[in-house]
Image (tube, rainbow, N blue to C red):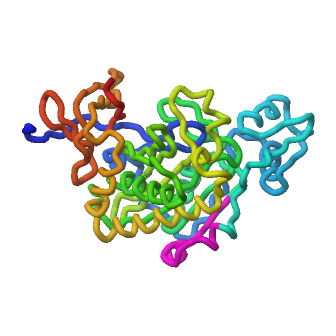
Amino acid sequence: MTFKPARRSSVWEGSLGTDYFSGVCTLDVTHSQLARQRNLNQRTTTGQRVSAPSEGTSDALRRVFDQLAGKRSALLSALSREETMLLTDYGIRVSGDRADLEDHVDLLSSAGVRASLRPETVAWLTDLDMRAHIASTNTTLLARASRERIDGCVLTAEVQTGGRGRRGRQWLSPFGKNLAVSLGFAIGRPLAEVGALSLVVGVAVRRALVGAGLSGVELKWPNDVLLDGRKLAGILIELVRATEPVEVVVGIGVNVGCAGAVGSRIDQPVADVAEQLDRPSRTALLADIVNYVVTACRDFDRRGFSAFRDEWQAAHRHQGQPVIVTQPAVGGAAGQTIAGTALGIAADGSLRVDTADGVREFNGGEVSVRE
């Protein structure tokens, strides 16, 4: 097949945020968004750690979350009726004035994570912060980045209560039934190349999932990890500092036991690690993901995206398929839709699509299969 010369789309994704999906922080980014993030260059290296109470959550509810993380049960006498009802949205069993975690809920272990980290990861790690509850791991790490360097920081929590919904979508985060983790990295590549980092992290997350025993794990441009075509995980990269070394927050969310709790409340297919693994260890999977992501980011530092491009394309769900790219709305107008055949990705991570007007490269938008 002969293609016309490639041309780039001039429309860019304009907003960043976490995309609601089956109760995990399924996170979203595009290349061009990096240049639009706030530049937090003016920082101190001696700033205090930012505490992160769960925004919009009462002290009483936070204490319940703390007790559940520590003892797997809590008394609810101090909660309002609305807060007690809210616990069921977080997948927590409520009976009378008592809340309990279900027996299969696998809580995270800091000691277990540290024991499973590779030497390269240990050398990179400066802080492993594991909490019972948080508003949003990405938001909290971004706030910390305004005060101090975050390269080497890992932040995770059993439950998120204030995830930032993308395009107004709801956020659900069952307690102890997913992985929501944010990592801070200093990237030694030019800013123009950092847009491909979401694809690099996708490759790393897929390696971790396949290594844990999952099959049928695929990638969807630019930031999704699929299991047999259904969304299993998502990624969000947020820029902290645009000057080299570029500093970013890498957010990752993975469904681990939550699909049953929230699958009936969303309008798209849901996948879950627990479908293929019997009683998966969230601690082991978290350590694996951190290990693989650290290794991939260091490799990206040294060799750039070319070291990952072939592997990404080999796992591309839509490779060679007819697709529709929906570009973001601009100036209040509906986003344009472009039909074509997905050819793979360009050297910078852009999606290449053979359209009626020739081969185009897209830096932003959402991709769906053309029926």
Q: Tell me the residue at 62%/27% (across/down).
A: 265
Tell me if I can see residue 195 in this picture.
no
The residues colored magenta run 113-130
Quadrant of the image occupied by residue 357:
top left
Q: Tell me the residue at 28%/68% (across/down).
A: 303
Q: Quadrant of the N terminus?
A: top left
Q: Residue 62 in the image: x percent, y percent?
A: 77, 47
- Closer to the camera, 275 or 239? 275
State yes or no: residue 23 in magenta: no
Quadrant of the image occupied by residue 288:
bottom right
Q: Residue 276 in the image: x percent, y percent?
A: 57, 48
Q: Quadrant of the C terminus?
A: top left
Q: Residue 140 in the image: x percent, y percent?
A: 58, 53
Q: Tell me the residue at 48%/41% (across/down).
A: 17
Count the marks: how many?
0
- Closer to the camera, 194 or 25? 25
Q: Tell me the residue at 69%/49% (across/down).
A: 176
Q: Is residue 365 left or right of residue 126?
A: left
State yes or no: residue 118 in magenta: yes
Tell me if I can see residue 368 in this picture.
yes
Q: Is residue 302 left or right of residue 204?
A: left
Q: Residue 171 in the image: x percent, y percent?
A: 59, 36
Above or below, 61 relative to 66: above
